[in-house]
Image (spheres, helix red, strand yellow):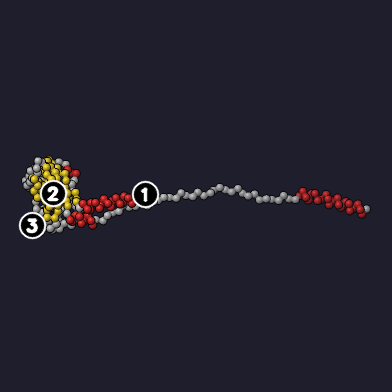
Amino acid sequence: MKKLFALLVAAMLVMAMSVTAFAATASIITDAAKETQAEVSNIMFNLPEGVAFENGDVVTVHIKGTADNTTVRIYLTDAVDVGRVTDVTMIDVVDGAFDVTVDVTLDTSGAFGGTAAPTVLILKGPDWQTPLSNITVEVVEITSDKITEAAEEAPVEEAPVEEETTEEAPVEEDTTEEAPVEEETEAPATGLAFAVVPAVVALAAVVVSKKR
């Protein structure tokens, strides 16, 4: 039963990882970002690790949330925001909410300042002077062919199969002691000897009497 259960668990893990690969979507929302922040200059979301983004790659961004700003901005850059590699996308906030899906193209030629692959998606206010106000991010999803390829190439770790370690019950040795066999001892034939002696004596007396 243990082996069967372990095999079922391994199969379920493989199926779950396969579904992730086909989805080709990396959700990078964090619990901290879901909390409403009264005033913040920007919010950064780390891009999926192990993805080799290159110049000309198209990345699809889906972002949803609420804010008091009338407009917010997003683009791909590095962790210190000095290597922007995409154009700035302006997102209108309607009735305090925004929910958009946009395609951005990576340009690592230096045209936007950056020459290396991006590591974060950054969300900012409408301009460099205006911070995000009462911002709450509900969804951030990144999709691209490179993410799909990385998901398909990722090794699938199989769950270890537990071996059955059924111990055999020890065989108890028979410790019953056999009763010692008493040896038969022949009784000395003393009775027969005593019976023969008188007969011999009597016979000798008869012989003596005849001679007389």
Image side of residue 69 versus residue 46, left or right: left
**Disc 2 or 1, which lies upstream in sequence?**
1
Q: Amino acid at mark 3?
A: Ala
The image quadrant of residue 85 is: bottom left
Find out whether the residues at labels 1 and 3 contact each other: C-beta distance under 8 Å. no
> Going 16% across and 47% down the picture, which residue do you hit?
140
Badge 3 density bin: few <14, some 14–19, many ≥20, Cα 10 Å: few
Mark 2 to mark 3 CA distance (whole Å): 24 Å
| Identity, as a three-letter code, of the amino acid under mark 1 | Lys
Determine the CA span between mark 1 and mark 3: 59 Å
Q: Position of residue 106 (x, y in %)?
A: 12, 56
Q: Is 198 on the left or on the right of 47, as rendered?
A: right
Please tell me whether residue 152 is drawn above or below residue 100 in the rendered image.
below
Measured in 3D between alpha carbons, the distance from the residue under mark 2 to the one under mark 1, in whole angstroms, is 47 Å
Q: Residue at x 20, y 53 (%)?
A: 24
Up-down: is 97 above or below 26? above
Badge 1 local density, few (<14 within 10 Å), some, or many (20+)? few
**Mark closer to the observer (1, 3):** 1
Write down the residue under mark 1: 2
x%, y% of residue 18? 25, 53
Identity of the residue drawn at 13% across and 45% down? 99
* Res. 40 in view: no
Secondary structure under badge 1? helix
Q: Which residue is mark 3?
A: 111
Please name whichever residue, 108 or 82, is drawn nearer the observer in this view of the structure. Answer: 108
Which of 93 and 134 lies nearest the eye of the viewer? 93
- Which badge, 1 or 3, is on the more N-terminal residue? 1
Residue holding disc 2: 101
Specify the amino acid type for callout 2: Thr
